[in-house]
Image: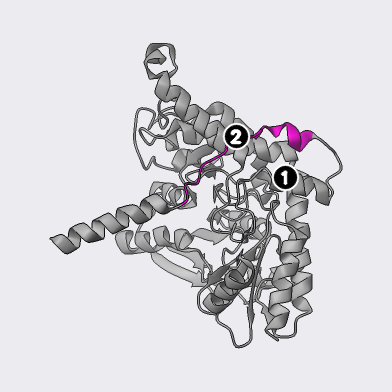
Amino acid sequence: MTQRRKFLKQSSLAMISLPFMSFNAKKDWSLDVLKATDLKDENYWKTVRKQFPLKEGQTYFNNGTMGPTPGYVLNEMINHMMHWNIEAATVDYKNGSGPSLLSGYFPCQKLRTKLGHIINCDFKEISLTQNATFGMNYVGMGLNLKKGDELLNTNQEHGGGFATWQMLAKRKGCIYKQAILPEPANNPDEIFNTIFKEVTKKTKVIAIPHMVSGFGTIMPVKEICMEAKKRGIFTVLDGAQCVGQIPVDVKEIGCDAYYSSLHKWLLAPAGSGLLYINKEVVGDIWTTISSYNWENQDDHGFRLMQNGSGNPALMTGYEAAVDFFTTIGQDVWYSRIKELGMYLRKGLKEIPSVTIYSSSNEAMAAGITTYGIKGKTGPELQAYMWEKERLQPRSVGSKFLRHSVHIYNSKEEIDKTLVLLKELN
């Protein structure tokens, strides 16, 4: 017992001695500074970088997993939580101010309308979810599938992109199949042919990524969805890596369903997901989580996002992230990501020992670049970059290093990466 008390005392002292990190709520986190100039030069992007409470001296290159939240968004969330914890008694549910204290029952029409402008659809075709995995499950569980129906994925799915279809195969007796994508993938026609080589008359669902999570490959989804529609096949796209990284127009793509995690490239707080289902087919999708509006036939997006009590501050942060994005401007935002991605890939191509596993076709690439270096594993490369220069990309499996670049990154940070890799030659 004496040893246990000693351990607890030492642990408590260690906790107390840790530096207390706090969010600087007094700093001007407003969007005004982002409107300061139309000239989006390097000085502008340095200003943008200051809108993130990222620690100086460290470089975050893992946006493909989780995007850092801008200070403006954090400030809006914190203010919401503090205000409504103080003013809780002033909320009058009878007069419709319930969303101030909880979410999950309300249509959030304003936020959904803003999202509709980003992906080009009516707000009633959008459901707010927690993440991409929720979206995939809402679609999969809502479809009327039966024994013998074929469900087609690829072999390069994120775990959140294949699990539902594998489970439905086991639960309902469907047939689960995977198309084996080329690696690296540089030819859209080759991908298209690989997908439809697996399609038969029994194929009911094609569920594929818009962008491959591991390699950042942009798939020829418009052509795939067009052909699938001719054959009466339901199409579901995993857009977890897309909304906020590349332009997404669901109407032009022509998919039946599209889901995404906006805590990645749109830099929304964790728990900010989106599900789109085309109004022409949504009536056939059953509600997965049922609450008051489970059978709402006027607003199907609202029907599918009924999920009980949630965090209203998260919805405030979600909408603030959308406002942050639109203030900088979609075209400017996407162009900067593409510019930095190309800058990294150009530098990597000049290093003989580096092998790039992402697409070398720039029309099929954006902010994610996956590569390896002879004689080093992915975890070894990740550790090396952190120890040397406090750079943090992410190892993917034992072989690869996945490098994500975003608007808060700089060419100087990318140059540090290239110098370290050259030193390994």
Q: Position of residue 126 (x, y in %)?
A: 54, 38
Mark toward the start of the polypeptide (2 vs 1):
1
Most distant residue in the top direction = 95
What is the magenta segment's predominant secondary structure? Answer: loop
Is residue 227 highlighted in magenta? no
For image coordinates 70% across by 33% down, the residue present is 31
Q: Residue at x 55, y 27 (%)?
A: 109
Label at residue 48: 1
Quadrant placement of the N terminus? bottom left
Residue 96, placed above or below residue 250: above
Q: Nearer the viewer, residue 287 or 333?
A: 333
Secondary element type, mark 2: helix
Residue drawn at x 78%, y 58% is: 339
* Label 1: how many Cα within 10 Å (few below 14, some 14–19, many 20+): some
- Residue 30 is inside the magenta segment: yes
Looking at the rendered structure, the kind of residue marked 1 is Val
Q: Which mark is residue 320?
A: 2
Q: Amino acid at mark 2?
A: Ala
Q: Nearer the viewer, residue 57 or 279?
A: 57
Q: Which residues are magenta?
A: 19-35
Dot 2 crowding, Cα within 10 Å, few <14, some 14–19, many 20+: many
- Asked where in the image residue 35 lies, by quadrant, the reply is top right
